[in-house]
Amino acid sequence: MDKIAGQWIIDSLEIQFEAFEKSLNGQGKSAAHQLRKKAFESLVSKGFPSAKSEEYKFTNFTKAIEKNFDLKLNSEASDLTAESIQEFEIEGLEAYRLVFVNGVYSDSLSDQITEDGIIVTSLVDEFKADSKIIANGFGKIADFESDAFLALNTAFSQQGISIQVADKAIISKPIVLYYFGDAQHNEVSFHVRNIISTGKFSEVTIIEKFDTIGTNKSFTTIVNEISIGENAQTQYFKIENDNEQAYHISNVHARQASSSNFKTFTFSLNGAMVRNNLNIKLDGEGIDTYMNGLYLLKGKTHVDNHTVVDHLKPNCHSSELYKGIMDGNSKGVFNGKIFVRQHAQKTNAFQSNKNILLSDTATINTKPQLEIWADDVSCSHGCTTGQLDMDALFYLQARGIKKDKAKAMLLHAFASDVLETVANEAIKTYLENIITERLEK
Amino acid sequence: MSKDDQILEELTSKEYEFGWTVDFEADEAPKGLNDDIIRFISAKKEEPEWMLEWRLEAFHAWLKMEEPVWANVHYPKVDFQDLKYYSAPKKKKSANSLDEIDPELIATFERLGISLTEQKRLTGVAVDAVIDSVSVATTFKETLGELGIIFCSFSEAVREHPELIKKHMGSVVPANDNYYAALNAAVFSDGSFCFIPKGVRCPMELSTYFRINAANTGQFERTLIVAEEGSYVSYLEGCTAPMRDENQLHAAVVEIKAAKNAEVKYSTVQNWYPGNKEGKGGIYNFVTKRGICEGDHSKISWTQVETGSAVTWKYPSCILKGDYSVGEFYSVAVTNNYQQADTGTKMIHIGKNTKSRIVSKGISAGKSQNSYRGQVHVMKRASNARNHSQCDSLLMGDQCGAHTFPYIDIENQSAQVEHEATTSKIGEDQIFYCLQRGIDAESAVALIVNGYAKEVLKQLPMEFAVEAQKLLALTLEGSVG
């Protein structure tokens, strides 16, 4: 038999998993822990994805981890204070802040949410109590068999939060989850798991933001399981602007009920190697789904976006727009899958992926993928790769605009298609500023 | 029963037109595959020593390979030891003219619609016919010979032009390229060889007809086309097989080389037996086709109409090595009943200012699965590469599937690459429009499908275009109402 990829990591993990089990005492017999065990067994038997694995063909995470980490799963405590994290907050955004430091939910740094219709609890407590939230939400949407890093997270994650939005609750302010990696002294690695459930006719916006403080390496996995109720309107943002040493794998798995509306925004701006898995199941009729993404890469950053939208029922609509600008030695990867199952007649599904390469050493690997088993559908995807339009550049230069400035304007216009879909003014301005700064530098 | 179902019923009960067999005496190798079989084939073909060595090397490489499983097709595993690797119609000695050929053979080709004698006179298409692996007749040899064009069976080429074969064979598709290419290299029994000398424009279409006749045989033919500087050739390929319950295997290799300013146009109408309506029988069609644009300003164009085979696994590709070279791929793939097709192309841009164009039209009906799998790869030094890909799928019936797997890998900033794909069914409004104008539903479907595939069909040479249109109508007649 072939040697499985990442055997060395797995050997190290086996010892840690054993230690983890011992530390659990009474919790070892819970259903949640049985799931962890299964996830870990699956990881041990299948291994981490190799260079030949189709899903990680262009993103060899296993090698990167083997090379860079000894994968101790628990990072040291950190003494970050409210002041030291302030500069990373989204300016001018009225929001509830929930703060994680090195993967541990910090009560003291977070806002207390007292609004009616929303309950935020720490997953540590929920695991301890083996509560209903765990029983109904842990590993129910995200299938660990689908991804080795999801299995890793399922086996080891203890930290995280649960957000439960009641029926008909309209949450007044967005909820921002700040993840700080304190890499000032040592490398960090952590695994966080969130369980989010939104009730019927509810409205909520959730934002995740990732920052690493310090210059050491970090390895993080985040899993969000989002269950969206009937007629609910849910928005999810992911803003990833880490340091150049950040290795990050995110799994967002959502299931939508009938007539719900789900909008996702994924912004990848910096990092060493970033993988975003976005997996949405349309499990009802009359659903609207929007997936928007922007990756703005330079240096050696490697960003991989894998999205799956799975149409299970008839009369739904999904629309996806991902755009990327690659400079320096950066590498962009995009894989968008649209599945339309046999019963999902009258489906409308659209997907568009557009890329600009700014340097000869930047690369893009893209694979828009349609798999359709129903006949009465209208599906399309488009994908382009190119460079700035020389005529447009000339037009601007002819009007006395310097070349650099003109280039920035054009790139800004290219990116604004995605930015324009952001309704929240504060978030939009915040992102626009980052992008302007990046482009005009 | 609704009209849809009725028409579908009619369609699925349609018989495969070419499903007969002819009992000529055949010279066969025993079942199985080992060094001795390969020696047997090589000896039968009176091949020189170097050819046998090449085959054995390929065979040993094949033994170490694993059957690829990544394609989106499902079928029971092929037992390679249960196949016959050589079957030739018995003939007394090599035929010099058509008169010496077994009359039954000629009748066979007449039933296929390629009457060798008649075609020789009327259509001006030079035909090389391959039956159960062996080339049986090549027409128009003399006329072509005057221009310096070599068009003959592969085994003849091995005997008579060994230097050309040695130089070019395996240079585009190496013997150990992939599982089926290696198998082909080890056991190929015949095929066609075509050489167009410098500056010659081939005055007629060259055509090969393949037919599997004997039971339990695999057909492994090899085609090699070499176009020297400034030459042009248009090459056609067609194929049929009898109806049988077991699955038969067809694993061919096609290699094309185009030198500076040369242009090669390769058209295929593939109509192997697709199996019956329960999905029993049919041909496994595992083909490796690849062309290389070696010189500057060269061009290779693939056109294919795929209507047959139970399982198809085929990716005609272009390596665009010369600067300003052009690669084209036009495809219509129709699947019905339980057919599965995984087909597409690879465009590898290596030279500067290279261009490629992909037009793929998939039509799936019944319980079939139709996949497009393609790659556009722009290498680092391929400045100003340009590609446009379009792949559309048409679905008829709610039990079939259409899948698209395009890989787009760009390493050069000046590349401009576009890909678009759509999936839909025939619009009710389109049908309604036709009905309103007195065109019945069935003709309307034919009309719409034909219009849908037109972009590809118009690339085919005239003789083929007519046949392809007929085939398309036959496979799909009335599949929606």
Image: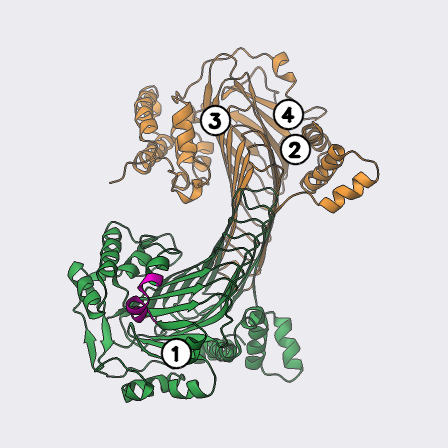
Chain colours: A orange, B green
Q: Residues within 10 Å of mark 3 (few under 14, many from 20)?
A: many
Image quarter of residue B10 = bottom left
Magenta residues, start to end: B153-164
Residue A220 has which mark?
A: 3
Instruction: Identify the residue under disc 1.
Output: B141
Q: Are the residues tagged 4 and 2 within 8 Å (C-beta)? A: no
Instruction: Identify the residue under disc 4.
Output: A96
Q: Is residue A67 left or right of residue A248?
A: left
Please name the amino acid that badge 3 sits on.
Thr
Q: Establish whether labels 4 and 1 are both on one chain.
A: no
Residue A81's x, y, as percent?
A: 59, 12
Residue A414's x, y, as percent?
A: 69, 41
Instruction: Identify the residue under disc 2.
Output: A171
Residue at the (20%, 70%) spot, across then down: B44
Membership of A44 in magenta stretch: no
What is the chain identity of the residue bearing mark 4?
A
Residue A162 has which mark?
A: none
Q: Mark 4 vs mark 3: give the one in front.
A: 3
Between the C-alphas of marks 3 and 2, the distance is 29 Å
Image quarter of residue B435 = bottom right
Q: Establish whether labels 2 and 1 are both on one chain.
A: no
Can residue A242 be seen by looking at this rendering? Answer: yes
